[in-house]
Image (cartoon, helix red, strand yellow):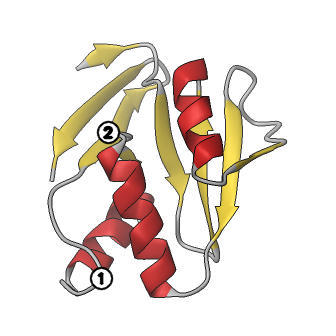
Amino acid sequence: MALATPAAYVKQADADFVRVLCYDETVRDSLRKLGFSPQHDAANNHAIAYQKATHGRADKARLLRLLRDLDIPFMGGHGWSPAEVFSYLREQPELLSGDFREVSWSSPRRYRIRQR
């Protein structure tokens, strides 16, 4: 278990876009290179939300793979959390394969990252 917040994590991946919350400038540069654009996110005072549209499952899987390869964890939770979207797409090996990191919180400043 860790304190504070990870440098970045995938916050949403269940719609026709992927949203990443980012706290670290070096990760922001990587997200920009992938085509992510900064978005206003009033709920997160200390992070910048980056968003990129996806066009179908194959495009979403490609983007999730790239984020995984940047070592950005995927938020866990109920319903179609980013971790569950990754797991679902991974069930189709032609779209996505391999492990990823899932982040979950036990309190606002305590999180846990596990390999899935």
Whether residue 97 sits left or right of residue 60 in the image: it is left
Cα distance in 3D space between marks 1 and 2: 19 Å
Mark 2 neighbour density, 10 Å: few (under 14) some (14–19) many (20 or more)? some
At mark 1, the secondary structure is loop
As drawn, the residue found furthest toward the front would be: 33
Q: Eyeballing the image, is 47 above or below 75? A: above
Name the element at disc 2: loop
Q: Can residue 24 be seen in this view?
A: no
| Residue 30, position as x, y percentages in the image | 54, 37
Q: Is residue 68 above or below residue 29?
A: below
Q: Quadrant of residue 64?
A: bottom left
Quadrant occupied by the N terminus: top left
User: How far from the left and from the top, in percent, is residue 7?
Assistant: 47, 24
At a point 23% along the width and 87% down the height, the residue shown is 94
Q: Residue 95 carries which label?
A: 1
**Relative depth, front residue between 105 and 36:** 36
Q: Nearer the viewer, residue 95 or 87?
A: 95
Residue at the image position 43 percent from the left and 84 percent from the top:
58
Q: In this view, does 83 lie to the left or right of 20?
A: left
Is residue 43 visible from the viewing direction of this image?
Answer: yes
Mark 1 burial class by Cα count in 10 Å: few <14, some 14-19, many 20+:
some
Pinpoint residue 104: horizontal percent, then vertical percent.
35, 39
Residue 6 in the figure: left or right of residue 68: right
Query: Which of the two discs, 1 and 2, labels the residue nearer the N terminus?
Result: 2
Foreground residue, 52 or 16? 52
Residue at screen point 60% across, 32% down:
29
- Residue at image location 40% in from the left, 73% down from the top: 61
Q: Mark 2 points at which residue?
A: 71
Tell me if residue 110 comes above or below residue 112 in the rendering.
above
Identity of the amino acid at label 2? Asp
Look at the picture and state if 6 lies above or below 32: above
